[in-house]
Amino acid sequence: MSDNKAFKSSGTLQLATGKKFRGELVAGDTSASFYARSDAEPVVSFSYSELKSMSRVRRGGTSCQATIILKDDKKYIFELTRGLMVYDYMNNHWAERPVEVKTRGDELRRLAELRGERIQRPRHHLIRRRHPNRSIGGDIGIYLMLVIVALLMAFPLVFAISASLKPLDELFRFPPTVFPRHPTTDNYSDLLVTMGQSFVPFSRYLFNTFFITFVGTAGHLLIASMAAFVLAKYRFPGGRLFFGVVTTCLMFTGYVTGIPNYLIMSRLHIIDTYWALILPAFSAPIGLFMMKQFMEGLPTALIEAAHIDGAGEMRIFWSIVMPNVKPAWLTVIIFSVQGLWNNSASTVIYSEAKKTLSYALQQIQAGGIARTGQVAAVNVIMMAVPILIFIFNQSRILETMASSGIKD
């Protein structure tokens, strides 16, 4: 190895066996060798094509510890006075070195090392804080408040489930207990026995409820989404007036609109049919309002680009708009399912074979004190479906409540 084409640095070499040598490392364009003091032959010599990995630890100034591992798993540790420069020289001439993905922080650290600056390593905390400008006491206070609020909000659900597992004597105990002392599932089995004694099978009530809920929710989502798309992205005469009417309808509860709805359905001759519940669900204003507000956040340029590419209105609606407003229509599903699942339909459906599960369970609740345990089981069954749907989609629903999304 010619000296005029080599980069030299004095230091020590440590082998994998622990043996150390003092001498000088000479790095050339294609290989490197370490010579011990007063030795003509190198103790270690390797070419850059044999390298498997290289790493270094800065010791201060230009000195560093360089660790070299060859492809045959031989390991050499060098402590060099000019280690940073020798390492960079070998690294630059290592043609087969693997590509390393470096971040901006890595590059800033490398430049700081070259300038000889002291690098402060970040402290690793057991708990990672999202707001480092807030004190630990503030964090503890906020989490404590959140825990208290969570317990208060979860208490009614926990109490309802516990009540459904209590025997009859514990249900009438005063003061009441939160958790059952002798949990039992007799309330649920008694409920099934009571439902089995009806001349209409329990499965029929269940089918009626599922059919009305599914069709009503699907129709409401489709009609509300299509109408919201037009109101949000197109301007036409009367559009603002129409949306103002929809917003005004949000002020009225179902009790206020019950009589007008009954008169309209009576004129349409759909009383005592499934459509008496499904059609009013199609026109619920809450879905149109939420979908329209969320669709306004979609960039109009996105729709215009689709028009330029030759996409039709339905293609834009199904392929671009609906996927981008998924949080909104999941929220609409929650509200629609909750309203239809708990609808007893006792004022518009008279045939027992067409009545819903909610109506049948309400009749059980009216059975008196002896059915108190069954009433507790009914409450859990009726709240289970809406709660489960919310749990599975809660992240999307919270995103809708925050009115998130891309903006123009």
Image (cartoon, helix red, strand yellow):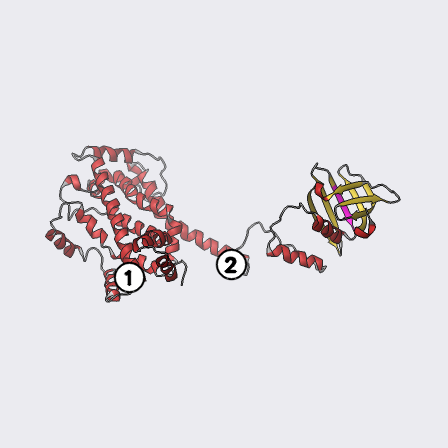
Residue 275 x/y as whole percent:
18, 47
Would residue 86 appear left or right of 180 to someone viewing this image?
right
Q: For the residues carrying marks 1 and 2, which lies nearer the camera in this image?
A: 1
- Left/right of residue 291 with respect to residue 42 in the rendered view: left
Residue 108 in magenta? no
Rate crowding at label 1 as few (under 14), some (14 to 19) or many (20 or more) other CA atoms within 10 Å.
many
Q: Amino acid at mark 2?
A: Gly
How many labels, in total? 2
- Secondary structure beneath disc 2? helix
| Residue 65 located left or right of residue 256 | right
Q: Is residue 152 visible?
A: no
Disc 1 secondary structure class? helix
Q: Quadrant of residue 135?
A: bottom right
Q: Position of residue 180 (x, y in %)?
A: 35, 38
**Image x and y of residue 26, in percent:** 80, 48
Q: Type of residue at label 1?
A: Leu
Main SS, magenta residues? strand
Residue at point 19%, 34% (across, down) = 201
Q: What label sits on residue 231 in the rendered view?
A: 1
Report crowding for label 2: few under 14, some 14 to 19, many 20 or more residues within 10 A (C-alpha): few
Q: Is residue 329 visible?
A: yes
Q: Position of residue 155 (x, y in %)?
A: 37, 47
Cα–Cα gap, marks 1 and 2: 45 Å
Labels 1 and 2: the sequence-earlier one: 2
The front one of 228 and 328 is 228
Q: What range of the chain is rendered magenta?
A: 76-80
Q: Quadrant of the C terminus?
A: bottom left
What label sits on residue 138 in the rendered view? 2
Q: Are marks 1 and 2 in contact (CB under 8 Å)?
A: no
